[in-house]
Amino acid sequence: MCLYIYMWLSLVQAWVFQHFQGMGNKDVWAGYIENQDPRAMLFLPLSGLGTVDNYKNHLDALDLTRVVMAPYGDHRAARRFEQVNLYSGWLRFGDRMVRYLPERVLRQFGRVQTIPRHLVESAPPDVNLAEITNRFRRALDYALTPQ
Amino acid sequence: MHDKETIPIMVAQWWQDRLQGTSLGWLQDTSYSLIDHGLICTFMERWHEETSNFHLPFGEMTVTLDDVACLQHLPIDGMLLSQETITRDEAVELMETYLGSSKGDALKEVEKTKGAHFQFGYFERIFKERLKEQRDLETEYGVTQEVQRLRDQVVRIYLLYLVGITIFTNKSQWVVDVVYMRYFRDFDLVADYSWGVVALAHLYRESTMMHVETAVKWQDT
């Protein structure tokens, strides 16, 4: 009766469907409403199920014309672009921390990618948890302040 | 928890009123029942922990907060979840106060899981118990304060369960941390937290773990 869902796997899968053509995303849901439903609901993961080798070859052969870097242009009525997306540095939840570095994937924000900074500069290793919370809060404050 | 007994509740006005503002309602719909493991593995091989991204033939790409916001409609512009771990006693207290658990039950549960955790089965049980209590009370006395309190508890149990089976699911942990109860005390405040960040951070961590596992498997063969 209880269905455990590995949401993070779902999220990776939805992300691949969204950004890479011909990677298991043949079927779309006819009932999808762009300015209402989350984008993950657009795709029905029914087909695909290729082998790792197939996918690998496909990915290696993909050229940039079949990669959709910034796919959410039509979705902004449902979810506007938040400035905090561009916050670069550590993120935490509870006592765990991970690096979040959109500065290395600027193409996904419709910008030109420059040579990335060194990791130590982007996310200094000597940071503590409280500091991460503060930095993120500052990024939010900054994003919410009218220019 | 979605079965013929509980589904009618999820269209009830009191249910929707409480859930609507939390921004977590979409979690019911944005996870796929079918995961294409070939597809996942192809990308996990290319995961890099230090930069939290995939190294692809045409450069670096990753799942961003914007992806999470658009794909799942989880809020990203809120406070980070910065809870510390809690003791079993604190867990029992939270369960009594906000989920209506009896002390004995709550103690038994933390004993069983050896920490401040619930098992999913326990959730399912108390979810149904509270539902029935509120229904019986309503039939007899109408929508009293006590009925409202029980309904709050029902929705809290559901939300904890929902984030447990979606955002926080991983292979090694079939329990839900009671500490997240703190974020469901007041329904109006749930959406002030950055659930999208939690989902993304979890994804990054799990990707790193899976990448390591895959690498070990290769070494063996």
Image: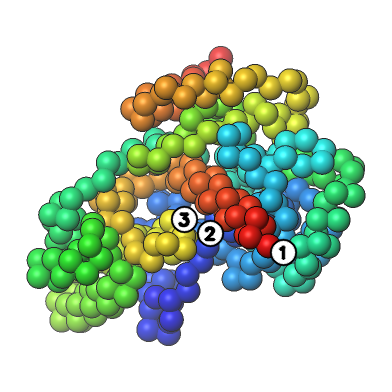
Three-letter amino acid code at the position of disc 3: Ile
Query: What label does residue B38 carry, if any?
Result: 1
Secondary structure, mark 3, is loop
User: Which residue bears the numbered disc 2?
Assistant: A7
What residue appears at the point 44 percent right and 27 percent down from the top-left corner? A136
Helix or strand or loop: what does disc 1 sit on?
A: helix
Q: Is residue B12 above or below residue B91?
A: below
Where does residue B78 sit, x and y in percent of width and height? 43, 36
Q: Which mark is residue A4?
A: none
Could you tell me the amino acid type at mark 1?
Gly
* Residue contact at pointers 3 and 2, CB within 8 angstroms: yes
Circle 1 chain: B
- Residue under mark 2: which chain is it in? A
Name the element at disc 2: helix
Q: Nearer the viewer, residue B213 or B114?
A: B213
Residue A23 visible in the current orientation: yes
Disc 2 versus disc 1: nearer the observer: 1
Q: Tell me which numbered mark, 3 or 1, is placed earlier along the sequence.
A: 1
Residues at marks 2 and 1, CA–CA distance in whole angstroms: 17 Å
Q: Pinpoint residue B97: horizontal percent, then vertical percent.
A: 15, 57
